[in-house]
Amino acid sequence: MKTMQLVWLKRDLRAYDHAALAEAARRGPVLPLYIAEPGYWSLADPSGRHWAFVAECLDELRTDLAALGQPLVIRVGEAISVLTELLNCLPIEAVWSHEETGNGWTYARDIAVGDLLRNRGIPWHEMPQNGVVRRLQTRNQWSKIWEQRMRTPLEPPPAIRPLGPLSEIGGIGIIPDARDLGIADDPCPRRQPGGRLAGVAMVESFLRERGEAYHREMSSPVTAYDSCSRLSTHLAQGTVSIRELVQATRHRREQLAAQAPGGGPHGGLRGTWAKALSAFEGRLHWHCHFMQKLESEPRIEFENMHRACDGLRDPKPDRERLDAWCQGQTGFPFVDACMRALIQTGWINFRMRAMLVSFSSYHLWLHWRESGLHLARVFTDHEPGIHWSQVQMQSGTTGINALRIYNPVKQSQDHDPQGVFIRRWVPELAGVPDVWIHTPWKMSRAEQDACGCLIGRKYPAPIVDHEAAAREARRRMGAIRRTAESRVESRTIFETHGSRRRGAGAIRTRQATSETRRKRSPNPDSESS
Ligand SMILES: Cc1cc2nc3c(=O)[nH]c(=O)nc-3n(C[C@H](O)[C@H](O)[C@H](O)COP(=O)(O)OP(=O)(O)OC[C@H]3O[C@@H](n4cnc5c(N)ncnc54)[C@H](O)[C@@H]3O)c2cc1C
């Protein structure tokens, strides 16, 4: 048998613009491999909805790779034992994959795989697939590197020389069921479908139609389900590459500019599409900006970014509070509607994610780690680098961001004024009149009877008093942020992680709320939309 290149697919489930696959295919026959690792799937952050999406991607990818010459090989087991077995049976010359900014478990797994391959004398080529830079020395040049990578030409799917029936290793293997991996049941009836075809269709529909009012409609969950791109899950599992998406966005901008009156190759694009595409492209930059934080400092998955916050919140959660929040039973209609929508769909927009975390971290004073794990499981798009950076940012533990204590009633009035979203996801409140839909606990007993919603029986009373809880949270956070040591550490954190857009303005040590200090800014570390 001829020597072969092993391509280890992880969260890059595509054949298009796959640098590792293309490079390997140039060297010789390719064994494309996906390993379903029970050790990973039994952790606290992955969930059934993640696996369901991945399984759909694998199914489609297997067909795509077969059409290119060699179907995907799938194995269930831990990476070390699967790779050892393959290396023992097949003449593997090199292993190829994309760099992964995963969780602590995948980080440790990759170190072990690196050791294994080094001991066996097999080179492992890990290639970047986004703007995240390994062993980054300074943030100063980061944006330049991001831009260079996004401009690199896309890799077309390569022709792959077939390997035959692979009887030495017992064939290509089947896509396991969630139960085979020990994954708990996780119904998510409105989850997005997986697979590259679905991802490409989302790119097309967003850039051609859905995205026109993106910048205006992203903040309300009433409009965001259609007006946001909904590409996060595809980016997280790699059915679409971020480079492909950046290039498609730029191409669309040029196309629209050329079509505009007085437009042409050099004519600038104005109007709603210009604003929408510019806001969107900015966020594709943020995608990598936030992932870079975890890549550069993996401990932030578990520990406060700002050490002055250690001991601030008890890592052992108040179970009653946590459960009420996780189940959408806090008594704040908008918070509960967002959580219940998220559980059923696997997605909610940025501002509502921020509000959910703000509520659990400030109003309920829960440690971000436990609430973050719940969200990691219910977000189909869980991306550890973005997730833990954002969870900490919205909990006030980064030391370089403004405090944003969202007022859940004001958010509700601003983003769901008629209570359409609330009534859809919290049916107990369907009969509550518009005037009380944001604060049903303020209804008199007679009004509760009249609309058939007894507070404390049919729907919970508010779990905390908003004003008092927010005041206390501001007091506690302020006490930490005012100390000289804390300010010094904030500067160090900014040096490592802060966005260089708008320079040191990103450091904010004074207290602020999004309601009082909302400004439009391209700085990802100060954005609240
Ligand atoms: C507490 C919290 C946790 C989050 N966890 C995740 C996560 O696990 N996975 C994830 O992809 N995003 C996460 N986000 C960021 C953001 O909410 C989602 O990327 C976005 O809602 C996904 O929907 P979309 O693809 O329609 O985004 P769009 O608004 O259409 O944006 C396009 C893409 O830009 C990137 N992006 C957008 N907003 C942000 C942001 N604020 N920070 C970083 N990248 C951004 C994403 O890749 C997104 O897919 C989190 C935000 C918060 C506040």
Image: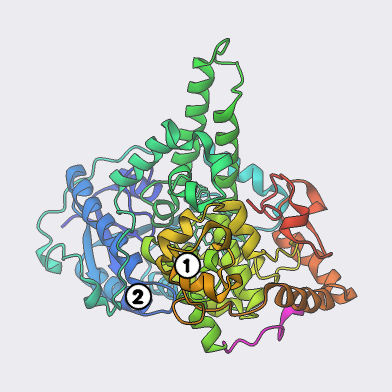
At numbered mark 1, what does the secondary structure look like: helix, strand or loop? helix
Vertical comparison of 278 with 422: above or below: above
Q: Quadrant of residue 411?
A: bottom right
Three-letter code, disc 1: Met
Q: CA distance from mark 2 to mark 1?
A: 23 Å
What residue is at 19 percent from the left and 54 percent from the top? Answer: 2
Foreground of the two, 206 or 53: 206
Residue identifier under label 1: 339
Secondary structure that dominates the magenta span: loop
Q: Which mark, by number, is residue 41? A: 2
At numbered mark 2, what does the secondary structure look like: helix, strand or loop? helix
Q: Is residue 472 visible?
A: yes
- Marked residue nearer the N-terminal end (2 or 1): 2
- Rendered location of residue 7, percent (x, y): 32, 57
Relative to 469, 177 lies left or right: left
Q: Answer few, some or many: residues within 10 Å of disc 2's Cα (few below 14, many 20 plus, some between 14 and 19).
A: some
Foreground of the two, 492 or 94: 492
What residue is at 26 percent from the left and 48 percent from the top? Answer: 28
Q: Quadrant of residue 445?
A: bottom right
Relative to 306, 215 lies left or right: left
| Magenta residue span | 304-317
Mark 2 vs 1: CB contact within 8 A: no
Vertical comparison of 187 with 270: above or below: below
Q: Is residue 4 visible?
A: no
Q: Which mark, by number, is residue 184? A: none
- Rendered location of residue 110, percent (x, y): 44, 70
- Rendered location of residue 457, percent (x, y): 46, 82
Q: Quadrant of residue 173?
A: bottom left
What residue is at 29 percent from the left and 67 percent from the top? Answer: 35
Q: Residue furthest top?
A: 262
Three-letter code, disc 2: Trp
